[in-house]
Image (cartoon, helix red, strand yellow):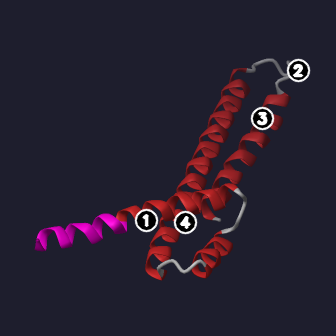
Amino acid sequence: MNIESIKFPAMTKNIVDEALNHHIISLLEKGHSTGEIESTLKSEGHDASAIRTLMLKLSKIQTGRKQVQGVSLIIAGSILCLLCLLITIMAIYPHSGFYMAMYGLASVGALLVLAGVIMILI
């Protein structure tokens, strides 16, 4: 009987946390900010510690997504800069029109790298 009393609250807690997760996801889909979500959950009477842990998980997920996007921008910009470098090196003719590759693509690549770094840092 003692084992059942231990398992039941844990199972209830998991069900409550799962319902709270779905509620947070629905609020995010409606466009609420994290502060609005936290205040809404507090006003609905949810457990403060559960709200805190779920909001920390949410912020980690959002930060991870921004980091993935930032790294992909950095990789794309680096590849573009490398391509520009190779085209510029291979352009042995002085009036061949590769100036666009040298200045235009390099600028775009550098801007992509900068945007990626900014996404990761902010």
Q: Mark 3 or 2, which is nearer the eye?
A: 3
Local packing at callout 1 (Cα closer than 10 Å; few below 14, some 14-19, many 20+) is some
Judging by the rendered image, the residue that carries numbered circle 3 is: 105
Nearer to the camera, 40 or 90: 40
Q: Mark 4 or 2, which is nearer the eye?
A: 4
Judging by the rendered image, the residue that carries numbered circle 2 is: 95
Q: Going from the N terminus, do you reach mark 4 or mark 3 first?
A: 4
Residue at image coords 48%, 82%: 48
Spot the residue most to the front.
1
Q: Going from the N terminus, do you reach mark 3 or mark 2 first?
A: 2
Task: Describe the element under mark 1 as helix, strand or loop.
Answer: helix
Judging by the rendered image, the residue that carries numbered circle 1 is: 17
Relative to 32, 54 lies left or right = left
Q: Mark 1 or 3, which is nearer the eye?
A: 1
> Dots 4 and 3: beta carbons under 8 Å?
no
Residue 121, image x and y in percent?
Answer: 61, 64
Magenta segment boundaries in residue numbering: 1-13
Alpha carbons under labels 4 and 2: distance apart:
52 Å
Residue at image coords 69%, 26%: 89
Judging by the rendered image, the residue that carries numbered circle 4 is: 59
Q: Mark 2 or 1, which is nearer the eye?
A: 1
Q: Going from the N terminus, do you reach mark 4 or mark 1 first?
A: 1
Relative to 38, 1 lies left or right = left
> Dots 2 and 1: beta carbons under 8 Å?
no
Task: Describe the element under mark 2 as helix, strand or loop.
Answer: loop
